[in-house]
Image (cartoon, coloured by chain):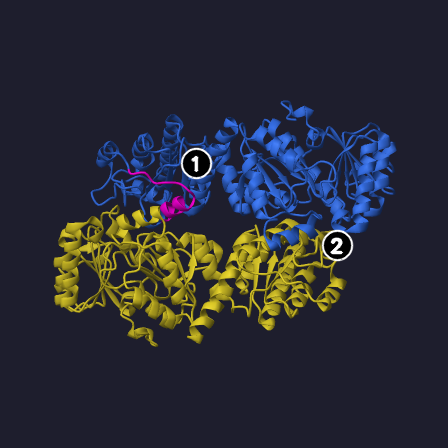
Chain colours: A yellow, B blue
Amino acid sequence: MMNSNIQDSRLFKIANPAGIAFFGASNNYSSMGTNMLQSIQAMGFKGALYPVHPKEETVLGLTAYASVSDLPETPDLAVIVLPTRIVIETMEACGKKGIKHAIVVTAGFKEMGTDGIALEKKLLETTRAYGITMVGPNCIGVTNPHHLLNSTFLPFEGTPGFIGMASQSGSFITQMFGYLGPRGLGFSTGFSVGNEADADIVDCMEYFGACPHTRVIALYIESIRRGRAFIETARAITPEKPIVAFYVGGSEGGKRASFSHTGSLAGPDRLYDGIFRQSGVIRAYSIDEMFDFCYVLGTLPPPAGNRVAIQTHSGGPGAAAADGCSRAGLVLPSLSDDTRDKLSPYIPATASHANPVDLTYTKNPLDYFSKIPEILLSDEHTDSMLVYLLASSSMIKRALEGMGMSAGDADENTEKIIDQQCSSMADIMTSGGKPLVGYSFLTRQNSFIKNLQDKGIPVLPGPERAAKAMGALVRYKQLRDKIAED
Amino acid sequence: MMNSNIQDSRLFKIANPAGIAFFGASNNYSSMGTNMLQSIQAMGFKGALYPVHPKEETVLGLTAYASVSDLPETPDLAVIVLPTRIVIETMEACGKKGIKHAIVVTAGFKEMGTDGIALEKKLLETTRAYGITMVGPNCIGVTNPHHLLNSTFLPFEGTPGFIGMASQSGSFITQMFGYLGPRGLGFSTGFSVGNEADADIVDCMEYFGACPHTRVIALYIESIRRGRAFIETARAITPEKPIVAFYVGGSEGGKRASFSHTGSLAGPDRLYDGIFRQSGVIRAYSIDEMFDFCYVLGTLPPPAGNRVAIQTHSGGPGAAAADGCSRAGLVLPSLSDDTRDKLSPYIPATASHANPVDLTYTKNPLDYFSKIPEILLSDEHTDSMLVYLLASSSMIKRALEGMGMSAGDADENTEKIIDQQCSSMADIMTSGGKPLVGYSFLTRQNSFIKNLQDKGIPVLPGPERAAKAMGALVRYKQLRDKIAED
């Protein structure tokens, strides 16, 4: 079932086409199809683009063709954004031309009820007759920044990343560009699967299992069409790559909304929890949670167990993290006497040696990023660590200026000091082999946060989110071990 | 117990002092006390500032006094940031001078165990002997932007707001400045209560109950010292102002962390849930949740019931909101036939008339902000509304340019159109008398989001958070009604 080579995936040519026939773009800038072709152009797609249009000679500056049969070659992929009534005849023409892959953006199929169901069946018969692999209908296509391909109607923002996402809502691909970028994250590839008449999330999972750019798989699920295949595929992938699913169909409101969205029948939470557990898939309850989990799972090795040391210099954020850990199934071990002894030279007398280790302040701020986490991570009772970050570059600068440095020199040295501190923390984590997650109310606009993130330490916005994400990392280890046992 | 006049509050002179005697600032820029006095200066405090220092003639450019007895007048407030061992004698000197209010920042009291407990008792005997109201010890003081007062060690950022916060962690006052500002929120006044040897969160609640700038009260709680007073005070305030509490002491980790933070003994979740329910206080489980709830509770009137209409043009964000509503105890009513008829002219044939109303796209984008929410809010089955916002100013600009407008004119007209659309939605909400909460993956950097927020429509980051906050608004109504019944 699993492909070891991504080129064997059914979806390979859909995410990595050499050329595209595009149906539904024109020179009318307000149409959906035009917007989508513009997105493809804007990203700098390297392959051939063939707009097919019955009347125009050029579309968006590209040579247009009256019919797909006129194209000078057979492209890998057709993208169809046409009125519902002419989708099937267009698919037939593509089949005759020898095109083997298609994305159908057009809606008006299964999600519309009886007539739409019949139409979707007929569409599927057409693709099968010509051996075409289809994504959709009622989807917004694919984004593969590594291939400079973005067929969605919003311009791609951000950078390529390590999250492979398959979504039963196009919005959670295209509207996430601006969400992931400021967090330092990005998609390896994102598939909007729509009604899943042919290719479905299981096909996407197989693709991501073999995709070298993908370190973690994110799924937005309103219902699972092929339960058994889902479980088998997930179990084959989980030992190598974690899978996180945000499932919304399990509540009354979610179930009804899913049905009118893609025409699928969702099942109760209990049923899906069982499927996910069997599959080794980690469930998330919101978009934030899904991407928090992906961030940590795609960045860090899982810890040996559920024992967490918390380091803070502020009592409240420490207590909130401790509370979050307990609620996420993690425990806060007492530190060994040896650890307490080792910590003493670095922390003030009024600080707490308990866990959370609350420094109140550090004698030498650099210790916060080096000696202290090093000692805590090497404690034999500790499997992982959470560190609160309130690191202000303006305070370092003020201190340097206080030591007589000019403003320009202070600026330069501040950046150097930040880089040293962050390198030190990243080195400690790497050599210790135990995961460390930062948390802060600051964003990536803060130099410390950006630098730590760029060096491979995930920093999450707030104590509970960091605790939950660490909980997901522990859960991944448990699920993976369980699959290995079976 | 409750003051109708804020000037009768024990804490009035602490949050609104005319003059301050400051102990522990020097010309050493790395000391905590110096940082705190700098913060007071930086905010432009209008009252007199009297640094007391044994050796310096001036401190931070202010005339310094060798002893508090030398001050030319008796200031309202003493702020003490001195070594633990000289706090009590300093308090005694303040008492002799006739000072009646003090903030003790210094740590090393109850939170340190036996010796500290004895020391704190002695400190309290001193303040009582002189009739001094004290906040602390082991706190970081008060921020009252309406009085241009910020005694915390971080510079104040942002603008005055309507959230009155009392916190058993100073971090959740001072480190929230940069968190609240970008969300368009701010504190009316924030108290860091520390060990609560004298004044405690109940005193703060009384202050906020009478504070004209405060529309909602936020509490960060590790333990409640005076249970009965807490319940009575909260019940007196809740009919007028909602109270939200983030309690972290209820889990094993949270309990242990709280103990080493402020030396208080926390109770199990069950006990505190009971206290909150009796008090009419809404519980939050994270900082995000607490401020989300405060945002909505401080902005909108509570709905008559728990029936929510969801408006979206993207299926996934609609389904996620529907799922979130169900999990937050809200229901999604079927819309009346009349509503469906009224909607028809404004929405495409492929759109869903069910709830969530998923427009897929709007024939005329302006309808999304006017006709459609107006129709949905006037449905008799609807008590409130959630609206998904993915509004792009660049798309409006592109359309205007497509109509032949110059770039400059398009920019100007884009802002006008956004303002019209947002005004329209705000008017509809106000005249309908039902609460409307927006949700988006965009931030306040987007013109639509900022404009809507500035016009009084709360916009929260994501569907589940919006649903939970609406759930808190419904809960507030229920708790208030229950108290009125009793």
- Residue A424, position as x, y percentages in the image: 63, 66
Secondary structure under tag 1 reads helix
Give above or below for A415 relative to B36.
Answer: below
Please name the residue that numbered disc 1 is placed on.
Answer: B451
Q: CA distance from mark 1 to mark 2?
A: 45 Å
Q: Is there one chain holding both mark 1 and mark 2?
A: no
Instruction: Specify the amino acid type for callout 2.
Output: Met
Depth order, front residue of B96/A330: A330
- Residue A139, position as x, y percentages in the image: 27, 55
Q: Residue A6's quadrant in the figure? A: bottom left
Q: Residue A230's quadrant in the figure? A: bottom left
Instruction: Specify the amino acid type for callout 1.
Output: Asn
Q: Chain of mark 2?
A: A
Q: Is residue A211 visible?
A: no
- Residue B456, position as x, y percentages in the image: 45, 32
Question: From the viewer's perspective, is B55 left or right of A11?
Answer: right
Span shown in magenta? B320-334
Q: Magenta segment: does it hold B331?
A: yes
Sort mark 1 into few (<14), some (14-19) or many (20+) by Cα contacts within 10 Å: many
- Residue B146, position as x, y percentages in the image: 62, 31
Secondary structure under tag 2 reads loop
Give above or below for B429 relative to A355.
Answer: above
Q: Residue furthest front?
A: B486
Q: Chain of mark 1?
A: B
